[in-house]
Image (spheres, rainbow, N blue to C red):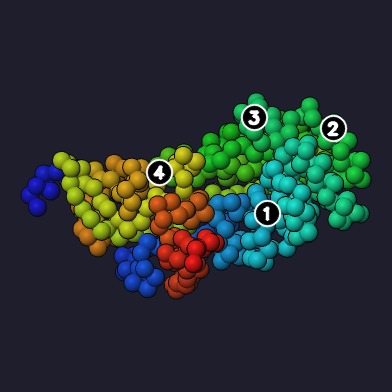
Amino acid sequence: MEKLQAMASLKKSHVTPPFSWELAQDLLTTYGSPLYVYQGSRLRQTIEGITKAISYPRKQFRFASVTNGNIALLKIFQAAGWGLHANTPGDIYLGLHAGFHPSDIVYSGSNLHWVEMEQVLNWGVTTLNLDSLNQLQLCCEVSQSLHPGVSLRLGLRLNLPEITGDSRIGVRPEEFADAIAITRKAGLKLSGLHFYRGTGTNATAAFTDVIDTVLATAQRLPDWEYLDFGGGFGYPYHHDGAAFDWQGFGAKLTDRVTNLGREIDLIIEPGRSAIAGCATLLAQVVSVKWQAKKQLIGVDTTIANLSVLSVHGGYRKIATWNNSQTYTTDICGNTTYSRDYLGKNCQLPALEIGDIIAILDVGAYGYAMSSHFLHRPKPAEVLLENHTHRLIRKREDYSVLLKNQILDK
């Protein structure tokens, strides 16, 4: 113990788990470890805060379910009056099962083939933001083939390098004339513009500084009726870092749209910013070792149960219920993958086998991007509501690794 005290950092841990140690113990005893835990009250508070930040009366919020597709959580958004933003037909499928009406679902995706576009329209989705002239042409052709006379609300995903950067997504303004011709030939209108800033942006100015440019570009569409303004709002995983200013953004966007001189519908698509903070991944310590002054903690989960590092980064706050002196610590997953770290150079107390750690802010691109890499089954998911908890997704077992395989007899 004297050796440990000599190695201790002078810093104390200031990261507090979102619920009590007793509750964490109860959850792992009931459902096992590792475990995704969602706080319904936290999610509702975030939804309410974002909703109130934009006072424009013709606003519509559509949750970007690419970040999390659990039906129980989608129902919370639906009950709050939000619709759904779908990147893929799978997002739509989940949304319909969660109770969203097709008219409350906006599709903004790319590169569908005929059968997929047919499926989207057969599900009754009528607002679609298309990624290319080819996709717009396909949508019009499928619509005329399946549902002639049905009115669609069609928009373009904007590609304007000075504000969208070097992106593969979207249609450039010089293509607008051809897009308008395609829709008019099909007896439809091109009535919307979709602006996507990029994923996980906490710099509020990255949105507010381009509002006027986006509005000016949208007005080049003669039948313009709606603006779909993001997508891409960030979340402060570094709790002491920059956070997206919803109040400031909402005030500026409302002012600009209100003073357009025409009425339009405004669609906002929060995803990560709405759901990231409501979830924690609990895991248990299964091994402890020291390398010089560094503590290496082995836990019963893996980075494969979280987002793909190369896509959405690897930083998450990690907390324990132990407030003693801290040490530089790596949290290591339960595989031999060389990058299987849940956290590196964290400041954590000396831990023991059986202790619980809490990986915070995993609601977005957590379970949604988990995989069977290195053949680990996925964790269960639990929802906390009104001092009770319930299972919202079962834990997988190893049989999932054989699913859909054709086995020789």
Circles 2 and 3 in contact, beta carbons < 8 Å: no
User: For mark 3, what is the residue?
Assistant: 163
What percent of the width, then of the height, locates residue 298? 27, 53
Between 152 and 234, the one lying in front of the other is 152
Q: Residues within 10 Å of mark 1 (few under 14, many from 20)?
A: some
Above-or-below relation of 60 to 236: below
Q: CA distance from mark 4 to mark 3?
A: 27 Å
Q: Secondary structure at mark 1?
A: helix
Front: mark 2 or 4: 2
Left or right, 385 with respect to 228, comes to left
Front: mark 4 or 1: 1
User: For mark 1, what is the residue?
Assistant: 89
Circles 2 and 4 in contact, beta carbons < 8 Å: no
What percent of the width, then of the height, locates residue 181? 88, 35
Q: CA distance from mark 1 to mark 2?
A: 26 Å
Tag 3: amino acid: Ile
Circles 1 and 2 in contact, beta carbons < 8 Å: no
Q: CA distance from mark 2 to mark 3?
A: 22 Å
**Which numbered disc flags the more N-terminal residue, 1 or 2?**
1
**Which numbered disc flags the more N-terminal residue, 4 or 1?**
1
User: For mark 4, what is the residue?
Assistant: 315
Circles 4 and 1 in contact, beta carbons < 8 Å: no
User: For mark 2, what is the residue?
Assistant: 178
